[in-house]
Each structure stands twice: as structure tokens, then as C-alpha cells.
Amino acid sequence: MIAGVDLGGTQIRIAVAGSDGRVTRTDRTHTADLVTPERVVSWAAARIRALVQRSSLDLVTVGAPGPIDQGRGVLVNPPNLPGWHNVPLVEMVQRELGCRALIENDANLAAVGEHARGAGQGVQTMVYITWSTGVGGGLIINGRLWSGAHGSAGEIGHMIIDPAGPLDSCGQRGCLEAFCGGRALSRASGESADVLFAAAAGGDHDALRRVTAAAEKMGLALINLSNLFDPDLFVVGGGVTRSWRLVAPVMRATLRASPFIRPARRPGLRRARLGDDGGLVGALEWARIHL
Amino acid sequence: MIAGVDLGGTQIRIAVAGSDGRVTRTDRTHTADLVTPERVVSWAAARIRALVQRSSLDLVTVGAPGPIDQGRGVLVNPPNLPGWHNVPLVEMVQRELGCRALIENDANLAAVGEHARGAGQGVQTMVYITWSTGVGGGLIINGRLWSGAHGSAGEIGHMIIDPAGPLDSCGQRGCLEAFCGGRALSRASGESADVLFAAAAGGDHDALRRVTAAAEKMGLALINLSNLFDPDLFVVGGGVTRSWRLVAPVMRATLRASPFIRPARRPGLRRARLGDDGGLVGALEWARIHL
């Protein structure tokens, strides 16, 4: 059997599956309840052991927020897991479970999940974008994840789209995330992103203007990604998918307005299908591929 | 034997090689002297036949400025070959030479050339950037050219880096090329790019300011490409390489100034080694790979 762990700032989720990668059992808990990396790994290992019962476990993939040091299997310093610094996650999981473990960026795994079992099925080349509090992504090239020479490809949120723009939490100025991310929208509007999007959906002019401006910036990112990667398809996941009818037409119109991207090479744009399960499904798929 | 054709706005160059891809003979002429696509193909075919003599020719690669319709082997409407519209180049070359022909974007082929026999030798993943009158590029991922789902990947010059920037010839606003390309620099300064770079090298303050600002924008592009692709190496070719000591330190400093790109994942930056031969060497290498 194989297992996947989705280690998020809010929840930790696990799933086990047969070698076909189809989920058989899942469990979850709140990250904050467990506090330390050691207790998180212990909880996940104990639950995985309970779920696989007497079957043997062959491979576990842990999906985690970046940055990740792939060479050493270390979670470096994820901004949404405060207190986690240089955690040797691969070694810890392997020791607890006695089987091989992989670690991969959670947005990359969501890309793998959407490609294998979600909105990107059957497509050779796609860019997955997660648009929530932050903005991230993953690249599928010729049917395979391209995670970069150092495991850092697909950092779409940190593409600079206006060097005079606001300072992003990463330290760069004018990143896509500094215009579009929920954290940035909340800071600029003084409201939570949820409230802002709800107000926009209700017709509030100022909220609608802010949401539209963010979707236009995301549309510029689609233009840049089309000109750099030339994918078949964009798949967008994350919290923004709950406001799809507000943002998708603006993103699509911005992409269509580029005279340089002829219709014959204009990628499609789809909403992610797996919702919050994308990363977990991708973790299992990643384990299946590496069996 | 194999042959390569580099179809440029100024010159047409051909080379023939054995199946190891090493150039044995070359020839060239001025594009303007031949006027029509038919005469260009006739000249290239006649010269290739003369150079291979009695050997049999197995495969020819034609490198041409984009956009290219790979599916139909058609050169669509290259801006620097006025009067060339929807030229079925693959079919024409195959008919004239009686052997299989491939067509590929010239910047992509320069990437292949620099990777196989130039500054990128031994590197798994690199981004090649050509910085001349226009700005283009090619992506080598895991040792292979990634030309995109529709043959349009690597259009680095058309990455938007400032949506309020100048209008580019492609119709988009604020493209990298609209800030850095020789054509844009010439329009902004009222001097040819050659004169501008020479003045900057001579210490002229205004010229130096303009060249430095362009190199900073190119440095932003390196940041974006690092965050999206995560390559091992950047290789920069084109006319700007004659002013390498002016632009390279600025590009390098801009890339280093990104706090998000840790030193461990910061790609190298090298000047192209093959000069004007990059595209032709790449055309032969592309033929060799596809034998």
C-alpha cells in the first residue's frame, strides 16, 4: 500500500491507497493541536499504521509548503508553519514508518493530482495555479511534474509583474502574490479576503473593483506563462475557486486581449476539480509513480 | 549526412555535417539578395547539394524566426522577414532536397546549440536568452528542448514586467523586449543600439543610465525565470554579448538582490560561447537528435 500526507498550516490530512493510487481511507486533524514536528510525524505515522492495518506499506509522500531542500529531504522554513525550521521530514517519516518516504511541495502535488484525476486529465502540458492566501503553482510538462533543478519551479506567486508594486512577504517588490494573494487583498482593503469576495459577489463597487484588478493581474500572469511555457491548459485551484464566476471571465478576457497569443495557441482555463483534496490525491499519485 | 539552415533577416547560412553533428562545411549569403521564399529555398538546397557532394542527405533542420506552425511546418509571419506569410517551409525543403526536413524556432535552436556545444555543456537545465534587436529564448529542461505545446515556449521577450510600460511591437504593453530590445533602446534614445552601447562603454552618463536600466529589467526577468523554471544556468547570447562587462554585473546584482532566491538555488549566468553560430550549430544538433 501507499500513503499520502498533506501537511498544511491549518490541517494535517492523511490518506492510504492500494498501488492503483485510489484512496481507500483518510483521516485528518488540526495542525495547531500537535504543535511540534515530532508530534505531527508521530500522529501521522500512527494513523497511517492504523489505516493500512496488516498490509505492508511501500511508500509515503509528504506534501508540505516550500521551501524544501529536496537533496536532504528537509522542510526549510515554511512561512505558514511557524517554528518549523530545517525539519528533516523524510528521515523522520522513514524512521517512524520503516518505509521509503518522499517529500514534495504541496502546490506541485496539487498539480499532479489535478493532472492525474482532476481538471487536467488527458492533457499533456498544464500549469496549475493555487490562488488563496498566497499564490503558488506547479508545472506539468509532457505529462510529468517539472519541479526544477533545485525543487523550486512553479513559484508563480513570486513572478514580478510590476517592479514598482507593493513589497511582498518574500522580500521582492511587485510579485503577483503581492497584488492577488488573499493576504495582500486583505491588507489593502482592511477586510478579510472572504468578506471582500462576498461583498464583490453582492455587487459592492469598491470590492468588485479590487477583485477585478486582482483577476486582471492574474490574467497578466497567464499571458506570461503562455509566452514562457506554452501549456495546453491552466487549472486554477485554491480559495478563489469559490468566486470563480467573478474572476474567471476577467482572467479569460485579459488572456484573450493579448494580440501576441494567437487563438490557435491560447491555453484553456479550468477550475480545479479536486478542491482541498488536490494535494492529498497528488501525494498518493506521486507515491504510485515512484513505486 | 545532415544539414542545417539558419534563416535570418540579414543572412542565410547553411552547414552540413556527418551524423556526429560536427560541422564540416558552411556557406552563407544575404537574405535580401534572394527576395522570395522560393529563391531562398532553391539557393539553400543547391548549396547543400553541392556541399554534401555524393553523400546521401538524411535530414535537414531549418531554423527560422517565429511564429512557426509546427503541425503544418509553416513559417507564419516573421516580423524580420517582410513579405513571408504562411510559407510551407518544411514541404518546400523536402521537395527540393528529397529528404526529411524539420523546422524550429531559431532561438530554440541556439539554446540547443549552446547546450550541446557551447556555454551550457554538461548542464541539465538551462534558459538561453538572446538579447539583440529583439529578445527571445529557449528552454532546456532535463537535457532536452522544451518548445511548448504549440511550439511557442521560450518567448522570454514577451513576458510582461510592467503593465504600464511602453507598447511592444507584439501589441502587448510592458514586455521585457519593450524595455531591453535594441529596437526599443534605439527608439527611446534616438541613437542606434550600437552607438548607445559604445557611448555607455565610453562613460557617457545618459547612455550608461539607459543600458543599466535595461540590464536591471533583464535581471528582473532572470528572477522571474528562476522562480518559474528553477534552472541551473542562464546563457545569454545575441548582440549584447559584445557589451558583456556593462550588462552582466548589473544582471547578476539584480538576481542576487532577490531575498526569495536563496544562494543554493541561484542559477549561474554565462555569456554564450558560439556567437552567431549558435543557431546553425543547434540546427545540426537538432537534426542529429532526430536521425
Image (cartoon, coloured by chain):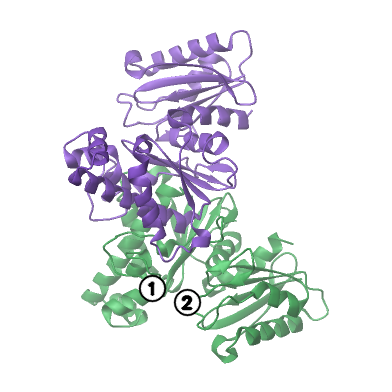
Chain colours: A purple, B green
Query: Quadrant where the C terminus of chain A lies?
Result: top right
Q: In which image quadrant can residue A171 be found?
A: top left
Secondary-structure class at tag 2: loop
Q: Residue at x 39, y 68 (%)?
A: B244
Is residue A276 in sight in this rendering? Answer: yes
Q: Residue at x 57, y 89 (%)?
A: B35
Counting from the top left corner in percent of width and height, residue B152 is at 52, 61
Q: In which image quadrant can residue A30 be found?
A: top left
Q: Residue at x 40, y 24 (%)?
A: A87
- The answer to whether the residue labelled 2 contacts the one labelled 1, judged by CB atoms less than 8 Å apart, is yes
Q: Residue furthest front?
A: A203
Query: Quadrant where the N terminus of chain A lies?
Result: top right
Residue where numbered disc 2 is placed = B79
Counting from the top left corner in percent of width and height, residue B137 is at 48, 63
Is residue B202 in sight in this rendering? Answer: no
Callout 2 amino acid: Pro
Residue where numbered disc 1 is placed = B169
Counting from the top left corner in percent of width and height, residue A272 is at 46, 38
